[in-house]
Amino acid sequence: EIGVEGLLVQTIYDSNNSSSTTTTKLTKLPPPEIGVEGLVGNTPMILVKSLSEITGNNVYAKLEYMNPGGSSKDRVALAILQEKIQSGELQPHEPKSKIYEGTSGSTGISIATIANSLGIKSEIHLPDDTSPDKLILFNTLGAGLVKVKPASIVDPNQYVNSAKAASVATEGVFADQFENETNWKIHYTTTGPEIYQQLNGQVDFFIAGCGTGGTISGVSKYLKEKIGDSFTSILADPQGSGFYNRVKFGVMYTNEEKEGSRRRHQVDTIIEGIGLNRITKNFSAGEEYIDDSVKVYDEEAIKMAKFLCVQDGLFVGSSSCVNSVALLKLCRDNPQIKGKNFVLAYCDSGSRHLNKFWKEALNVHDDVTVEEILNNK
Ligand code: PMP
């Protein structure tokens, strides 16, 4: 029942004593010999009061941006790095030992952050239209950066293919977030159980977007196995992405969208980090546990950004807004859904989107209403 003000006291609640904002004690503090990587996971959950009131449900946000690298991707980066260090493929403090990844955002920042903390060098390949806010972060973190022309996944110079090729050429390690199943598994063993425990098992709905599919697959599989059919998983899909059609009708591609075609963020949508026109191993792993999908448009997400900031003091990134709009649409179209516990993935904060998504959101007036957000779509 606590909103963002609860985070002023501490970042991690003692779940046995969650009713108090002031007397709860910090739990699971990392022992002093652990660096930044010790802060990954165990993210707080808060009540989004405005959305709860409007929908007549309890709407909780899992604040993944409270991870030290600023997003849920820290979990994946840490899991992959630990695995590769344990197998001997990566050696800390060995200058030639390097991890490579192709990413337009969060994963690269998480890999660079956690790799630095573990003494591993990183090289990130990204499209040259990546948002300026993220480029500044990459430069600050000292990750090797290779910018490539935006291209489809079938092009050998596309950023994922280019990172993979560089890892092969240098006998380095390729993280491979889209196809490496360590990704969904870490959400299955950490994010899912955390959500379950934070709500004492009373989870009715989980809403998330799909970038690699790691989050929605891992969390949905865990909660479905634990709770059963009374739990519902909803995939929130931005415009230009094929997952909505896949979940609703079993087909990934519309007639206009060619298989494997690049979903150009700046052309098709302003939303970053979610939406794709191909099926990844991390999506396949959990597809059977996803019950439904809601399509969300840029315009709606942009208005939602301002709404959450003004109403709840929540300054969040574009995918968090997409999940919040999906909640409103689901509840509008299913008015019988009342008194349920919803969990929304809030993957990153608005500060990563200042020069793109938030540039638009700043133009939305402060009193924007739910009716204006949905605009009959
Ligand atoms: N939100 C943002 C901002 C992201 O960067 C990502 C990952 N690309 C996601 C959501 C989706 O996470 P996943 O890759 O686990 O599907």
Image (spheres, rainbow, N blue to C red):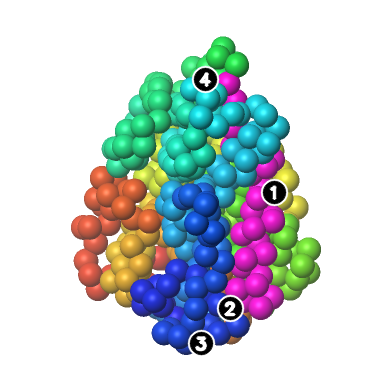
Q: Is residue 220 above or below residue 4?
A: above
> Does any portion of residue 260 appear in the rendered image?
no
State the image quarter where residue 180 is shown.
top right
**Residue ID for mark 4:** 96
Q: CA distance from mark 4 to mark 2?
A: 44 Å
- Badge 1: residue crowd in 10 Å (few <14, some 14–19, many ≥20): many
**Residue ID for mark 1:** 185
**Residue ID for mark 3:** 19
Q: Nearer the viewer, residue 164 or 300?
A: 164
Of circles 2 and 1, the one toward us is: 2
> Does any portion of residue 10 appear in the rendered image?
yes
Q: Residue at x 56, y 66 (%)?
A: 28
Q: CA distance from mark 4 to mark 3?
A: 50 Å
- Which percent across, then down, holds residue 50? 40, 78
Q: Which circle's residue, 1 or 4, is located before the other in the chain?
A: 4
Indicate whether residue 192 is drawn in magenta: yes
**What amino acid type should be assigned to the residue bearing mark 3?**
Ser
